Image (cartoon, helix red, strand yellow):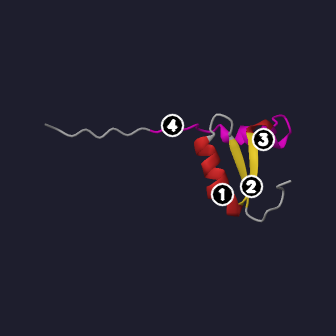
Amino acid sequence: MKENDLRGTIAYAHSHPRTIELVAEGKIDLSPFITGKIGLEGLVDEGFETLIHHNDTAVKILVSPSGEGLE
């Protein structure tokens, strides 16, 4: 008998800088991906619960620690 240890990872090497550049230039609109905006106090009850139980419609939820930009 022997024990096997298998580990894996996935990464996107060197792709983020260009993506950030395209967003900053306004060439990519990320607003369709933002499905919610919440304050920090709603992180667990609203944020995680929504992503866990409604992952068919919830994609990205922005969390604003200060509460700014939630409108």
Q: What's under tag 3, amino acid-wise?
A: Glu
Q: Earlier in the sequence, mark 1 or mark 2?
A: 2
Q: Are marks 2 and 3 in contact (CB under 8 Å)?
A: no
Q: Earlier in the sequence, mark 4 or mark 2?
A: 4
Between the C-alphas of marks 1 and 2, the distance is 7 Å
Q: Quadrant of the N terminus?
A: top left
Tell me the number on the disc at residue 10: 4
For label 2, the residue is 38
Crowding at mark 4 (Cα within 10 Å: few <14, some 14-19, many 20+):
few
Between the C-alphas of marks 3 and 4, the distance is 22 Å
Q: What's under tag 2, amino acid-wise?
A: Ile
The quarter of the picture where residue 14 lies is: top right
For label 3, the residue is 21
Looking at the image, residue 64 lies above or below residue 18: below
Q: What's under tag 1, amino acid-wise?
A: Leu
State which region is magenta: 9-31
Q: Earlier in the sequence, mark 2 or mark 3?
A: 3
The secondary structure type at the circle numbered 3 is: helix
- Please name the residue shown 73% across and 51% down the image: 62
For label 1, the residue is 43
Of labels 4 and 2, the one closer to you: 2
Of labels 1 and 3, the one closer to you: 1
Q: Earlier in the sequence, mark 3 or mark 4?
A: 4
Of labels 3 and 4, the one closer to you: 4
The secondary structure type at the circle numbered 1 is: helix
Q: Nearer the viewer, residue 2 or 67?
A: 67
Between the C-alphas of marks 4 and 2, the distance is 29 Å
Between the C-alphas of marks 1 and 3, the distance is 29 Å
Q: Earlier in the sequence, mark 1 or mark 4?
A: 4
Looking at the image, residue 49 lies above or below residue 26: below
Residue 3 percent across, percent down from the top left:
21, 40
